[in-house]
Amino acid sequence: MKIGNLAWLMGTMLLCFSGLTLAGNVSVTKHNLSAVGIGSIKSTTETKVCIFCHTPHLASPDTPLWNHELPAGQTYTPYTSSTIVSVPGQPNGSSKLCLSCHDGTIALGSVLNMPGTNRNQGNFGNEAGVIEGLESPMPGASPAMLGTDLRDDHPVSFVYNTALSNANPELHPPSTLMSGPVKPDNLGYLQCTSCHDPHTDDNPNFLRMASTDAGGYGAQLCRTCHNKLYWDTVTDQPHRESLSQWNGGGTNPWFQEGHNIANDADSTPKANACFSCHQPHNGGGGTKLLARDGEQQVCLVCHNGNVAVKNIEASINKAYAHPTLVTDGVHDAQRDGVSGKVHETQSNLDNRHAECQDCHNPHAVSAGVSPDPTDVGGTTNFAANVLRGVWGIEPAWPGNWGMLNDTDYVEVDDVVYQYQLCLKCHSSYAFGISPPPEPEGTPGYDSMTDQAKEFNPNNASYHPVAAIGKNDFIMDVVGEGVFDYSSSLLDNLTAASTMSCTNCHSDPDADTGGPKGPHGSEFWPILKAEWGPETGMPGSESHLCFECHDVNVYRYTTSYTNWQKTGYSGMCVSGFCGIYPDGLRVNMHAWHGFVMSGQIPCMTCHTAVPHGSNKRALLKYGQDPLLDTGADPDPYNAQERRKAVGVGGSTGWANFGIPSRATVDTIQSGNWVKSDCHGTGAQGSATGGVGCSWAGD
């Protein structure tokens, strides 16, 4: 090469590395660390731009002509997650180069080839050194300082290939990336430079793409690789479509640059998209790159009334709530490599918890709640749209009141029925044969109960959560004919209706615009209305049972002789109805609850856990188990918890209940007689102390 050509080439290189002819114009970005740079971190004397990263001579073997000192023997802690399929290793390629500044271990001005002073005479450098003014590493307070613990940063230095996208269908195939701005490096590794262009900040944070597309949907760069299930396919997905704005109250929910102000039409969940919940660097939640510390806080920073309409935070702060704010457990799901969907395994459920994501898939939720009494036929047991995309379990139902082992369940990726979601925690699937303690320490409820056992459609009776109920609300009365008493059901319910757990377990404020669902309540155990030992007694007209069952039928009535109103109707025998003559048919629910001074609560005869029973009509043998060995055990037997109040001061009511010698399972509705419940002798009289009777019977 001629000397003139060499001089021309050298001049061109010097112009390039002095920042005069730079693609992307790095000189007007914060990566210009020269004395004339625009950032606050810069040299006090050096005016060249590219020298902090590149040099034409005496460079590191790492391309492209790398000049900054690299960490020697530094070990990084890579990102990890229970759902990740790739295996990020120690940073390599361009990621290692970026971290030579961004890990905070090396002075920002530490270079392999110090700037020369007489390049025209062939002096290409003064060997390694530190450029003046940049003697310290990147400060820890800088948001760009990633450190050596990369568990809270998007994974890098892993191979992004077809095998990876096949193992995780929530990733686009690499072939779809090659024509776009985000792509793996020439060896197939996803690196820092796949997302960031260090030479231009046309987009915030040196990103290779603008955040929003022409339709105003945000996080377009994330979605170049991530193909989240449901995100684009679910209509009316609020986390994708919502134009709600932060009202300025409480904690600022936004952190994305340009979207961090209140009452701004461009700062919405739609504009933020992934960045509403995830932060690709220095995420507060560690794994899953959550933007805040604690999964529930990611949700509650919006669902506290300051962005979302429903104030979930107020609900879970009520007296009785799912322990979302107090448990130490986390939503630590596993990914199924076939379906790409995620759910926990039974081993994870040993660490009981109640995070928002255990019940809700934030990528799939859409408008629509259950129950809705305005539906034709009343409510249903189908999972509402807010539960879409959540995994659950389906029991292999045994016989009447049979026990299930923790292996008697099939996992389902997307719950169809709401009970499939609830049972994954409230059944033997989660706790085997050893239910955990009842969290509120309620007397008589020493532990939680197996609700798969209770809602079993093969039971003699149950509330219709898993299947249509056994009660057809029809009475075939001997000598009288067939009568239909389904009019005793309210809210469009029929004998063929099903219901969901949230028919009963829900925030009471849902009736006035608050959130539905078992987030929290003033009534134990997360019930939408009061229920307990006083239900059925005077003053209990607003209790939970009477939201579905007409109080004027079951609690009291001015025409309690209208026996057709309930299946528990029968003939007065031997003065059983007091002042009413033998042979008169009466509505025994109304008679026990109204005529007899209203001192007989529902729990006297019906199970105190009204999910299901091994006997018809949720009945139980409720006498003192110490005296009647056939009585049902706690917590189903409420004999010791019910109100023991007698008529006219009588104490003979104290042990009122159905003795185990009764024949309640063989009685046809509408054909009850006194002897079906009331007995004689030691276990059936007042003197015996355990009869369904009273003094003088």
Image (cartoon, rainbow, N blue to C red):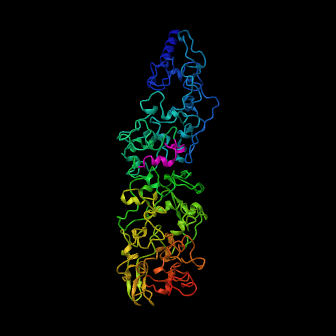
Q: Nearer the viewer, residue 209 or 244?
A: 244
Q: From where the camera sits, is residue 389 visible? A: no
Q: Residue at x 36, y 58 (%)?
A: 512
Residue 334 vs 92, above or below: the answer is: below
On the picture, is 5 further left or further right than 472? right
Residue 540 vs 139, above or below: the answer is: below
Give coordinates of residue 589: x percent, y percent.
42, 78
Q: From where the camera sits, is residue 12 visible? A: yes
Residue 302 within the segment the image draws in magenta:
yes
Q: Residue at x 58, y 42 (%)?
A: 87
Give coordinates of residue 611: x percent, y percent.
49, 69
Q: Residue at x 40, y 78 (%)?
A: 594
Provide the residue span drawn in magenta.
284-304
Counting labels gives 0
Name the quadrant of the N terminus: top right
Q: Nearer the viewer, residue 651 or 36?
A: 651
Residue sitting farthest toward the right = 73
Give coordinates of residue 673: x percent, y percent.
46, 86
Give coordinates of residue 374: x percent, y percent.
34, 64
Residue 15 vs 220, above or below: the answer is: above
Residue 140 within the segment the image draws in magenta:
no
On the picture, is 564 further left or further right than 446? left
Residue 85 vs 667, above or below: the answer is: above
Residue sitting farthest toward the front = 649
Q: Nearer the viewer, residue 71 or 62?
A: 71
